[in-house]
Image (tube, grey):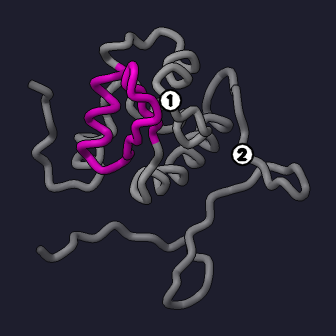
Amino acid sequence: MKATYELPCNIAQSLNIIGDRWTLLIIHEILLENTTFNNIKKSLDGISSNLLSDRLKHLEDSGLITSTLYSSHPPRYQYTLTKSGKDLENVFNAIIIWGTEHLEKCHKKLIHQTCNHEVDITYHCSHCNENVNDLSVVDVDS
């Protein structure tokens, strides 16, 4: 059985869903429009078919992807991200920016398409309608 975090923490509870090896990379491949089992497997050199199949089932059970049968003989599925899955794009962008700043060898960077310059992450308060830097993490009343 898979070990899970029992901590009352958004990070821990999110890792229970997306923290397994290969899981984020699979979601990223679907985001990049590699939406079939074979395309995902081809893009992720080193992942076994059994593990990919297991992770896709877990992601579907968790509500991050949906599958649609596109061939019945043999059965083949196309995978699409749900809104919850698509919302992880911000996480990927943050990891890309972190990697640009901290990895010894950088493989990707996040740029503004119009001017081709790198971008930063900005936090915006929709109530005040302004960008903010003074952030706090607070407990949510249950």
Task: Check disc 2 and give the amino acid type.
Answer: Leu
- Quadrant of the drawing holding the N terminus: top left
Number of numbered tags placed on the structure image: 2
Callout 1 secondary element: loop
Residue depicted at 48% across the width and 30% down the height: 25
- The disc, 1 or 2, on the residue closer to the chain's N-terminal end is 1
How far across and how far down the image is residue 124, in percent? 56, 75
Q: CA distance from mark 1 to mark 2?
A: 26 Å
Residue depicted at 45% across the width and 29% down the height: 71
Q: Is residue 88 above or below residue 25?
A: below
How far across and how far down the image is residue 142, in percent? 11, 74
Label for residue 69?
Answer: none
Q: Nearer the viewer, residue 125 or 59?
A: 59
Residue depicted at 39% across the width and 28% down the height: 72
Badge 2: few (under 14), some or many (20 or more) residues near its Cα, within 10 Å? some
Span shown in magenta: 52-79
Task: Check disc 1 and give the amino acid type.
Answer: Thr
Where is mark 2, residue-wise?
110
Residue found farthest to the right: 115
How far across and how far down the image is residue 34, in percent? 57, 32
Where is mark 1, residue-wise?
36
Residue depicted at 59% across the width and 88% down the height: 129
